[in-house]
């Protein structure tokens, strides 16, 4: 029930910002969610680095918003340099350097995992199309309903029919039957989108796109579960009742955001 109530509260706010407000409103909400998710990652990792990581992530999201994708590589390069210097000058005199590599790598990886992937959500929102001024809103509505339908289909199918575990070492509760139910939900959502608000999305593209999004969503979910296993944590946070933290909701979106952006570049631009 908590999962349903959370969706009832958050989804109208999300779609209102997407369809009614300008790009800045949705982008601000998305950026706040991504930065909170990154902060939860740093809490899970327990290796510090929040200041430089969140600063680099904020700069990266601004580059996505203003369409300056070429600056993202420069931001990553600057973060690597700052992190290496931090390791060089902040270690105690009697402390060896055996932990330097895993600490530095963990800190930089968080920005790549959460902000570099999640930033494509903002990149989609600022897409401009003279022929179809609502294209960005349509793409992101498709994005959210496909992801949410897949999560919902997997959850309820798994509870009702789940027998064979999908990845017992990483996430014992996920089942093969649930994954199949999720893929059915992904496909159904894409077809509904085509017939209701997104006729530009051809059926021949809609179903394969939804299936790939479903597979990537499952992979993203399992990868985030792997991170939590490594940190011996049940959830990344407790901000959203029934869902855990922001990172627990972003997990199936992070792998899909670049996919949808480049799908637009190839098929809809």
Image (cartoon, grey):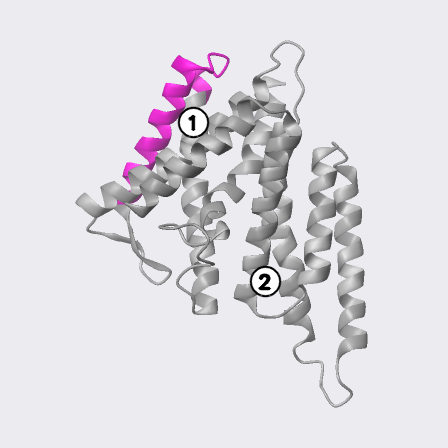
Is residue 192 or residue 210 the one in the foreground?
192
* Residue drawn at x 71%, y 45% as measured from the top left: 60
Residue wearing tag 1: 208
Among numbered discs 1 and 2, the one appearing first in the sequence? 2
Q: Is residue 172 above or below residue 99?
A: above
Q: CA distance from mark 1 to mark 2?
A: 35 Å
* Whole-percent x, y for residue 72 in the image: 75, 44
Q: Is residue 74 above or below residue 90?
A: above
Is residue 5 or residue 165 the one in the foreground?
5
Write down the quadrant of residue 91 in the picture. bottom right
Q: Residue furthest bottom?
A: 94
Magenta stretch bounds: 177-205
* Residue drawn at x 77%, y 35% as measured from the top left: 68
Give the quarter of the figure containing the C terminus.
Answer: top right
Q: Is residue 183 left or right of residue 98?
A: left
Please tell me whether mark 1 or mark 2 is closer to you in this view.
Answer: 2
| Circle 2: element type | helix
Write down the quadrant of residue 148 in the picture. top left
Does residue 185 show up magenta in the picture?
yes
Residue wearing tag 2: 42
* Residue drawn at x 68%, y 67% as measured from the top left: 104
| Circle 1: element type | helix
* Whole-percent x, y for residue 207 in the image: 40, 24
Is residue 42 or residue 153 the one in the foreground?
42
Q: Is residue 212 visible?
A: no
Check disc 2: other Cα within 10 Å, few if <14, some if 14-19, many if 20+: many
């Amino acid at each position: 029930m908590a999962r349903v109530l959370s969706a009832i509260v958050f989804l109208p706010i999300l779609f209102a910002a997407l369809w009614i407000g300008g790009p800045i409103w949705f982008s601000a909400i998305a950026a706040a969610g991504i930065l909170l998710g990154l902060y939860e990652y740093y809490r899970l990792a327990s290796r510090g680095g929040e200041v430089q990581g969140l600063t680099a992530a904020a700069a990266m999201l601004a580059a996505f918003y203003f369409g300056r994708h070429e600056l993202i590589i420069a931001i990553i390069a600057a973060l690597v340099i700052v992190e290496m210097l931090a390791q060089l000058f902040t270690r105690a005199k009697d402390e060896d350097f055996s932990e330097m590599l895993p600490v530095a790598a963990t800190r930089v990886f968080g920005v790549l995992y959460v902000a570099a992937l999640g930033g494509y959500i903002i990149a989609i929102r600022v897409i401009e199309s003279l022929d179809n001024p609502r294209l960005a809103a349509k793409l992101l509505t498709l994005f959210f309903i496909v992801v949410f339908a897949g999560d919902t289909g997997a959850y309820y199918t798994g509870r009702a029919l789940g027998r064979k575990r999908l990845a017992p070492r990483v996430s014992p509760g996920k089942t093969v039957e649930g994954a199949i139910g999720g893929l059915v939900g992904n496909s159904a959502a894409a077809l509904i989108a085509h017939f209701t608000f997104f006729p530009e999305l051809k059926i021949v593209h809609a179903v394969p796109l939804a299936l790939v999004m479903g597979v990537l969503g499952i992979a993203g979910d399992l990868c985030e579960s792997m991170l939590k296993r490594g940190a011996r944590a049940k959830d990344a946070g407790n901000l959203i009742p029934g869902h855990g933290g922001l990172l627990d909701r972003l997990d199936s979106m992070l792998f899909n955001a670049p996919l949808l952006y480049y799908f637009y570049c190839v098929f809809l631009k």
